[in-house]
Image (tube, rainbow, N blue to C red):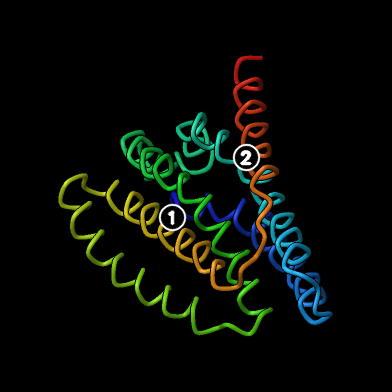
Amino acid sequence: YAFRVLQLPIGVFVIAVSQVALPSLTSVISQGSGSRDIADNLYKAISLVLWFIFPCFVFVVVNSEDIVRLLYQQGAFSSHDSSMTSKVLFYYSFSLFGYGCMKVLTTYYYATGRTNYPMWVGFFTIGLHFFALYFFTKKYGVNGIAISSFCTLSINGAFLFCGLIYDRLLWPWKKTFLTLFFLVFATVASYYL
């Protein structure tokens, strides 16, 4: 039930941005643009995903119990079920960032024709997910499912990002850190206002 709630921001924002980014990335790559242009285009897509995902993440973290209670607590779904589902939703919400980056970066790899790399990263993280599921569910119970998803999706996104080194993209680090700073600042400010 918790993952169903999380599919809303994933479907509305992450998949939409990655689908819009694909033609733009393909165009820049096929024109033989420099690595700075490609990196800027990819940065814009990831930045846009983060600007959409970050407020969704904060909203779900702060209101996970209320969301689950509103959507599910009726009929046979008891308050105990709502409490358990809201905890799982809380942990699942952290996987939004990894999933968002993974989706956009996979789009980049398809645009460049390097489809083997994300495939092997996917195989590796699927295998890692089995081990993480075993470890985290043993330690944290049902919450371990969400925690293992967060870990493996984050690792997947990190490996895909590290794979950009092969393409020697001139990544706009200053813009990236500024974006992250403003995201955190805006979130903290909106939380206290």
Please say if 19 is above or below 111: above
Q: Quadrant of residue 109?
A: bottom right
Q: Element at badge 1? A: helix
Q: Element at badge 2? A: helix
Few, some or many residues within 10 Å of mark 1 (<14, 14–19, 20+) = many
Please say if 122 is above or below 98: below
Residue 193 - label: none
Place of residue 11 in the rendered image (x, y in percent of width and height, measured from the top left): 63, 59
Place of residue 18 in the rendered image (x, y in percent of width and height, measured from the top left): 69, 65
Few, some or many residues within 10 Å of mark 2 (<14, 14–19, 20+) = few
Residue type highlighted by circle 2: Phe
Residue type highlighted by circle 1: Ser
Place of residue 13 in the rendered image (x, y in percent of width and height, measured from the top left): 68, 54
- Between 105 and 3, the one nearer to me in the picture: 105
- Between 94 and 157, the one nearer to me in the picture: 157
| Disc 2 target residue | 177
Please say if 127 is above or below 184: below
The label nearer to you, 2 versus 1, is 2
* Nearer-N-terminus badge (2/1): 1
User: Seen in the image, is 80 located left or right of residue 96?
Assistant: left
Q: Residue at x 36, y 51 (%)?
A: 146
User: Seen in the image, is 41 located left or right of residue 96?
Assistant: right
Place of residue 125 in the rendered image (x, y in percent of width and height, measured from the top left): 36, 68
- Which quarter of the figure is the C terminus placed in? top right
Disc 2/disc 1 C-alpha distance (Å): 18 Å
**Image label count:** 2
Residue with the most extreme left position: 138
Please say if 52 is above or below 29: above
Q: Quadrant of residue 181?
A: top right
Q: Residue at x 57, y 34 (%)?
A: 59
- Between 154 and 69, the one nearer to me in the picture: 154
| Disc 1 target residue | 154
